[in-house]
Image (cartoon, rainbow, N blue to C red):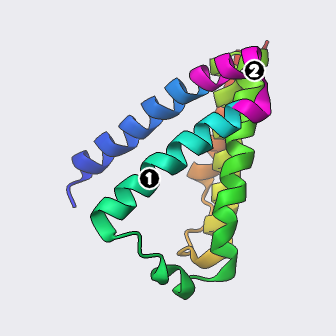
């Protein structure tokens, strides 16, 4: 697959996450964290359910083939969405997402290093460590 295509998809995802964070923060301030998570997951779940029914007939039989721990992606998503909805209106969009992305990078590096959850092993290199240290410096600069 063309790398430019993948970069564009990832960038669109990043834009959507930032927009979602701000919109959820607004719901959180007005209605509460649980309500913002409900709107996000409820609306998204409804939409993907309709799409899945239209495109695939709603068949979930493939889920019986996945390892049990992969089903934790749902609760992890709830934690992510709740953390975004709660932290954005209290910290601001940039500080909240700076911390979120740094935590993602650190966790992803460990998953890659040890091949956890079926990931291909990609050792932590000096370059990766340096990049994460620069990111942590960025967090400090953003938060001061």
Residue at the (46%, 82%) spot, across then down: 62
Q: Earlier in the sequence, mark 1 or mark 2?
A: 2
Q: Is residue 139 above or below residue 130?
A: above
Report the residue that reaches farthest toward the left. Answer: 2
* Residue tagged 1: 48
State yes or no: discs 1 and 2 in contact (Cβ < 8 Å).
no
- Image coordinates of residue 100 in percent, x first then y, are 68, 37
Segment colored magenta:
22-35
The quarter of the picture where the C terminus appears is top right
- Image coordinates of residue 129 in percent, x first then y, are 65, 49
Q: Is residue 113 above or below residue 41?
A: below
Magenta stretch, main secondary structure class: helix
* Residue tagged 2: 31
Q: Nearer the viewer, residue 102 or 60?
A: 60
Q: Secondary structure at mark 1?
A: helix
In the picture, residue 116 is in which quadrant? Answer: bottom right
Crowding around mark 2 (Cα neighbors within 10 Å: few <14, some 14 to 19, many 20+) is few
Q: Is residue 76 left or right of residue 125?
A: right
């Amino acid at each position: 697959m063309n790398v430019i295509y993948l970069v564009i998809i990832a960038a669109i995802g990043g834009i959507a996450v930032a927009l979602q964070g701000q919109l959820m923060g607004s719901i959180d301030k007005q209605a509460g964290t649980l309500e913002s998570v409900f709107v996000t997951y409820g609306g998204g779940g409804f939409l993907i359910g309709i799409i899945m029914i239209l495109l695939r007939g709603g068949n979930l039989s493939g889920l019986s083939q996945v390892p049990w721990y992969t089903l934790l992606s749902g609760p992890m998503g709830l934690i992510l969405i709740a953390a975004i909805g709660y932290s954005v209106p209290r910290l601001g969009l940039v500080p909240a997402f700076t911390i979120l992305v740094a935590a993602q990078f650190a966790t992803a590096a460990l998953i890659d290093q040890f091949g956890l959850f079926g990931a291909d092993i990609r050792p932590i290199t000096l370059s990766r460590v340096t990049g994460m240290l620069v990111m942590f410096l960025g967090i400090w600069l953003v938060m001061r």
